[in-house]
Every structure is written in structure tokens, then in C-alpha cells.
Amino acid sequence: MDYKFEGENIKRKLIEKGLYRKLENYNSELEPDKISIGYSYPIKAFEKFLGYYDDYYKIAYNSSISFNTDFSLVYSACMYTKRENSDSVILDGKQADRYIERYRKPLEIFRKNTGVRGSFKFYIKRYRKYDEAKGLSESSAVASAVSRCLIKNVFGHKAGGDDNFVSRYARLVSGSGTRAAINGPSIWLSYPGIMEEDSFAVKIPTYPEKINYAIFPKNIDYQTSDAHSEVVKSPFYDSWLDRKYRRINEIIDEDFNIEDLMRRAMEEMFDLNSVLMSRGNVIQTPESISLLKNFIKFSKKNAGIYITGDTGPSLMVMSSDKSLLNEFLESVDDPRIIGSHHPTEHKQKEMEFYNESKEYLESL
């Protein structure tokens, strides 16, 4: 399959539906020591992606589709300084040297694209409804929040409110962050050969409010970066991509039907695990496998309930029938978090976070 040709076809369809447009250009409004903040909720994928065609610019081999969840919340503050070579990142109150490495390349690309000189200091805080877990897309919220506060700081509030523009730069930190930058369900346009400035997420006309969902947080010591590098070596990777492109086209043609998206999320979870297992990578735990067995047994007797997961053992169960979801939840003992739509935690945390980040950043 010619993925560039198929990707251009997806792009054409999104343009024809009025969903995709070229990004606006913004002029910088740099002001030394100004502090800007941004927040984000993580995403959960329907149509997933794994593997980068271009790791430098974080261009994925395929487009992906998701919606925002409220299992956690991330706030980020950014302060600009004229002093060069002094970028810093504070994460949850501690110097995050590992994150400096993660953001060095995105900031390098950002400066190259914008011509901005100087440095940026970030203060990031995660608000979780769980302890440690893998597969809840927390990194997507971090990338999105960091990108939004950076864009606000450099280009002003109008640019900071342009979700598509924020999405482009969130991508440079984390591919999943591309979609987390959109307030609502979204599709990230990505395929081999796409221009870097054209690869961002846009909102799609579907209604995740119809989804009743819960997550079962579980942890494993496995890095998503390892999954990205391993999956492309699988002998089944090309056939997985072929199927993705066919299904994405069908999803767009069917106007992003929410029941089909939930069903697709479940198919994708099993496909993703199979492709990774072909490389010897097992991302489930005995506890998550036990939960999967219980779900499969339950779903054989009850249609309309779905399960999905990303690169980790945390599993999400969802259904448009709330009573059906509750019936399943009552049948298992695993700790879970009930998800909701249109969360408001960020409103309650905003002033507290701003004052906290301001006090720290101004002390530097």
C-alpha cells in the first residue's frame, strides 16, 4: 500500500468535510519574565498509532483518533528569559533532568521554526486520580499543557487558544499530545511524506458524551519509546498499517460513528498487543489478563460493551449503555476510576497553580 497516497486521500476527505485547514501564522509577542499557563487532560485512543516514520519531527506512520478523559490533569507554566542555554523543567516540584532531554529537541525545532532566541523555564504539575499506572496517556496531557503555555508565552492568548496550532507543537514532545491539545474528539493527520507543518490534530464531529467508561489502572515497567522502536520491526507491522488505512477511510465515510469507534478501539487493542508480542514484548500483567478474561466471558453474553488499552496494562471498559457498564463493574473486584465528560478540575486548580508556579519561577 502507498501510505503517502492513502494519507493524502484522508487529508482530502477531511478538507472536503470542513474539518482540516492550514494553520494560521502568528507574530511573536515576547516579554521577558512573563508567565503563561496551560492545562490539559489526557486522551484515550480509538484508532491508535505506534511507530514513527520520522522520529525527529514525530511524524507517525498513520493517522489516529481519540477523545479526552479525566483520569488526570496536567498544568504547566512557562517563563521566557533572554538568557540563552538555560532551559529548565520542574516536574511535580523536582528538577526533571530526564524531561530536559525530552524537550531539548522540540525546543530546538521550535526555535528554528520561529527564530525565537533565549530560554524557557517550565513548571509542570500532575494531578492524578491514581498512584502509578501505565497506559493512561499521561504523557499526552504533559505534552499538550507544555505546548499551550509555550505558545501563549511566545505568540499571545489568541494563538494559545488555537488548538490546532498548539497541537502541532505538542506533537514534537509526544505524538499522543497532538490529539490531547484538542478539546474534544479529534483525528491527528499523519502519514509518510506529510509536511511537518501540516501534521496536527483537528476536532471531529462525533459525540463521546454517549460513552460511559471506566479505567482499571495497572502498572508495568515498560517505556512507550521502546514500543515505538520495536513495533516497526514486527513482520506484521505493514499488514497492521494496511488495515488501519482501510478502517480510517471507513470511519471518515461513516461520519465517525461512535459505536464503530468503540468497537474499533477494542480491535486495535488486540492488534497492538499481537504486533508487540511478535517482537517478544508483553505489555499485560497477570492482573490485567485476568480482567481481560472476565471481560471476554461477560461480553459473550452481553453485546455493546467494549474494552481497550494502549501501551500498558491499564484497561478501559466502555459502553453507550450505562447500566451494562455498571453490571460489568459490579462483576469484578479490580480498583477502577469512573470517567466523565466536560471535567472542571482545571477551573478549581487554576489560581492555586498559577500562584505556586509564579512563586517558583520568579525565584529563579
Image: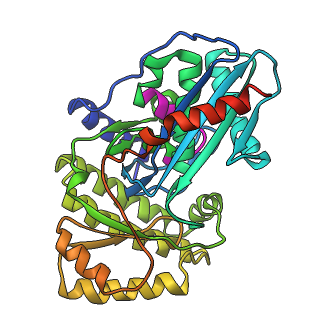
Q: How many marks?
A: 0
Which of the pair 353/122 is nearer the observer? 353
Q: Is residue 78 above or below residue 68?
A: above
> Residue 280: within the magenta?
no
* Quadrant of res 232: bottom right
Q: Quadrant of residue 153?
A: top right
Q: Residue at x 23, y 52 (%)?
A: 209
Q: Report the span colored magenta.
A: 164-176
Q: Nearer the viewer, residue 125 or 281?
A: 125
Q: As drawn, is 156 to the left or to the right of 69?
A: right
Question: Overall secondary structure of the magenta stretch?
Answer: helix
Q: Confirm whether the magenta stretch covers residue 171.
A: yes
Q: Quadrant of residue 188?
A: top left
User: Where residue 103 sits in the image (x, y, percent)?
Assistant: 69, 39
For the point 35% across and 67% down, the residue is 214
Rendered location of residue 203, percent (x, y): 31, 38
